[in-house]
Image (cartoon, rainbow, N blue to C red):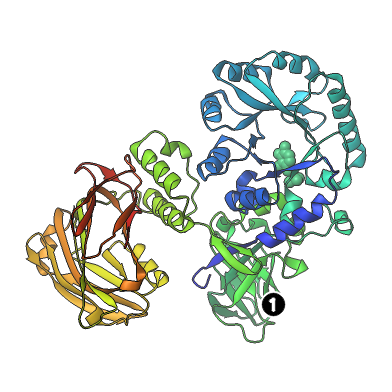
């Protein structure tokens, strides 16, 4: 967060507490569906879905196919209901991904039935006046749907239009629905009508499922609900002061000079605007909290910047944290801000955080963050090309390790979006050999020589080799694509040249110079040669040899492959008796060949076989 200009914090503990509060209003048979449409009202659908499932949500509600696919792609397995009407051309993917469409027309039901078996929820319009079968004609339609053999009616539902403010109309809707469900002779698994406001204002016994949205995110749909249920905001939106300025009487601030200073004043420029979801209508109206004090927005909110009056602050500094929305003060709750411009809480929440990075907090600790680049992507992109298969397999295989899955995921996003126009990097003829020998100098360690060689397009006229003692320190080198070799040094060894050296580095037949730098818990060795200039952009042969030490007591050594690689051979040589190799490969073949001889064990694939990132081998001795 230290490095972010603006960001959101999503408090999953508050979210859970809100669910617990709302559950007090359920009758004993009732379950809940967590509504995660619009990226969970801007809170992040994946993380909210995971937490809700942990808190016993039986299903998830999304707006459309794309949102459902994304959750499936991220590994969510529970039933997902698509709340808005789906389109005919989406049927195939609905079926393939085991999503549950809602049915609002007979025509769609018939088309769905033709294409395959599917669970459905039937939507009844009892007065909302939006999608769904009108309650008066619902029965005859339901009877026709009943005869469509491929469709399984898993649920029947309706939706309140004004549960937070109009008890009379809510009751009318409820009565219409109740009457309908007593007239047909089917028993769907789920009957549901209440949104989160309805849970509080109109508890009922005939339904056995409720759909939780806004209130579960800790935002009240109506201030009168505050006396009934105690909720805490889940989202906080923060930023920092980037510049401090002063204005004299008569000076104007911002576009179109809508604010004129009436006296000498100090103001701060904050790096967020309406493109970050902060509503333009908050111009000259919005409030923010800085150092526990409320400051007013002055002038128009612009696309990426906003000014606030900080005259009353004692010692404002560039870098001070600014809270734009959230828990800290009632003046900056979602409800208060939207009341300033007659806006809608649902809208403000779902706008915010489209650009800002999200940090997920639980019990005061950050447990996760959303990817660096959170652009919506169409899972379809993944289904019909080769890259799609690569990604799918890689994620699927790796999900068993969160750490590696994250790495892959980040890598994918980076490649797909940030570096969209760049070639995908890959290595060929990958050979990594590692040799252990006894060391007279350090008997508790093996003297370890390694050689790595591969063919790859040269990016720059240099590259780096990195070594660190902790995974955390080494992590940053995984994000840098000028680093071709990384080594994790055992914690018991000092970070010194005598314990990790590059003995030879070559590109084609050019021997490179190397320059070592030791800082911040890392050894970084830059390998370069002026002749490389002419080779940039061409495929070249790399060869990197090192010498280091490895503790005998470790009993295992891991080698990872972190780029797309065609043709792998990893070998381990030693005098040790019982060495086993445990390959964890993702790729078309998960089982590379293993060859054992007296003192050497090799893991290899065919020369043209692709191996996906973060495959690896663990040698156990
Ligand atoms: C969005 C939505 C909800 C959730 O409503 P809240 O007021 O946010 O609780 C419930 N049901 C349907 C059909 C919805 O579209």
Residue under circle 1? 262
What is the residue that sits farthest to the right in this orientation?
168
Which residue lies at the image location 38% right of the left edge and 38% below the top edge? 389
* Residue 300 visible: no
Coordinates of residue 17 in the picture (x, y in percent): 75, 59
Secondary structure, mark 1, is loop
Count all numbered tags in the image, as a single digit: 1
Which residue lies at the image location 76% right of the left edge and 67% below the top edge? 331
Q: As displayed, is residue 43 above or below residue 29?
A: below
Q: As displayed, is residue 504 above or below residue 590?
A: below
The answer to which image quadrant residue 86 occupies is top right
The answer to which image quadrant residue 265 occupies is bottom right
Label 1 CA crowd tier, 10 Å (few <14, some 14–19, many 20+): few
Coordinates of residue 8 in the picture (x, y in percent): 60, 62
What is the residue that sits farthest to the left in this orientation?
509
Left or right position of 349 against 550: right
Q: Quadrant of ligand 1?
A: top right
């Amino acid at each position: 967060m230290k490095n972010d200009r603006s960001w959101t914090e999503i408090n999953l503990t508050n979210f859970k507490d809100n669910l617990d509060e709302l559950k007090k209003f359920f009758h004993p048979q009732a379950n809940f569906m967590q509504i995660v449409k619009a990226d969970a009202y801007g809170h992040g659908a994946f993380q909210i879905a995971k937490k809700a499932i942990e808190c016993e949500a039986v299903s998830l509600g999304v707006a459309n196919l794309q949102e459902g696919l994304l959750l499936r792609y991220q590994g969510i397995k529970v039933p997902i209901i698509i709340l808005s009407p789906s389109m005919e051309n989406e049927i195939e993917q609905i079926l393939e991904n085991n999503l549950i469409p809602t049915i609002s027309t007979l025509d769609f039901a018939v088309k769905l039935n033709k294409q395959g078996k599917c669970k459905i929820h039937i939507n009844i319009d009892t007065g909302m006046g939006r999608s769904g079968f009108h309650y008066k004609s619902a029965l005859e339609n339901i009877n026709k749907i009943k005869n469509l053999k491929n469709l399984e009616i898993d649920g029947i539902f309706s939706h309140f239009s004004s549960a937070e403010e109009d008890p009379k109309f809510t009751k009318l809707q409820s009565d219409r629905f109740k009457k309908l469900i007593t007239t047909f002779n089917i028993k769907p698994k789920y009957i549901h009508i209440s949104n989160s406001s309805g849970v509080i204002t109109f508890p009922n016994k005939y339904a056995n499922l409720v759909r939780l949205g806004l209130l579960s995110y800790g935002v009240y749909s109506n201030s009168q609900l505050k006396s009934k249920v105690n909720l805490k905001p889940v989202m906080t939106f923060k930023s920092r002061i980037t510049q401090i300025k002063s204005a004299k009487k008569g000076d104007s601030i911002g576009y179109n000079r809508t604010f004129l200073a009436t006296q000498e004043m100090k103001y701060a420029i904050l790096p967020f605007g309406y493109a970050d979801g902060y509503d333009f209508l908050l111009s000259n109206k919005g409030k923010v909290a800085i150092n526990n004090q409320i400051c007013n927005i002055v002038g128009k909110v612009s696309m990426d910047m906003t000014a606030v009056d900080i005259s009353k602050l004692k010692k404002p500094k560039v870098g001070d944290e600014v809270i734009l929305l959230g828990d800290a003060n009632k003046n900056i709750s979602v409800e208060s801000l939207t009341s300033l411009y007659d806006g809608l809480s649902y809208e403000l929440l779902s706008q915010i955080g489209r650009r800002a990075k999200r940090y997920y907090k639980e019990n005061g600790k950050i447990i996760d963050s959303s990817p660096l680049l959170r652009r919506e992507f169409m899972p379809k992109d993944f289904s019909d090309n080769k890259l799609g298969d690569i990604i799918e397999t890689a994620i699927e295989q790796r999900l068993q390790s969160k750490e590696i899955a994250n790495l892959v995921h980040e890598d994918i996003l980076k490649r797909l979006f940030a570096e969209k126009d760049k070639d995908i990097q890959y290595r060929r003829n990958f050979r990594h050999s590692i040799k252990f020998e006894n060391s007279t100098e350090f008997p508790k360690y093996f003297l370890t020589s390694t050689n790595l060689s591969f063919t790859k397009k040269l990016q720059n006229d240099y590259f780096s080799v990195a070594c660190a003692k902790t995974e955390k320190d080494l992590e940053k080198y995984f994000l840098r694509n000028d680093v071709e070799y990384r080594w994790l040094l055992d914690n018991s060894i000092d970070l010194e040249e005598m314990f990790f050296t590059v003995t030879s580095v070559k590109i084609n037949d050019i021997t490179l110079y190397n320059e070592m730098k030791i800082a911040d818990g890392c050894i970084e060795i830059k390998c370069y040669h002026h002749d490389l200039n002419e080779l940039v952009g061409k495929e070249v042969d790399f060869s990197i040899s090192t010498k280091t030490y490895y503790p005998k007591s470790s009993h295992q050594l891991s080698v990872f492959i972190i780029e797309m690689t065609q043709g792998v051979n990893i070998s381990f040589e030693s005098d040790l008796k019982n060495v086993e190799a445990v390959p964890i490969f993702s790729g078309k073949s998960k089982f590379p060949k293993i060859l054992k001889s007296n003192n050497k064990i090799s893991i290899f694939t065919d020369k043209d076989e692709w191996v996906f990132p973060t495959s690896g081998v663990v040698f156990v001795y």
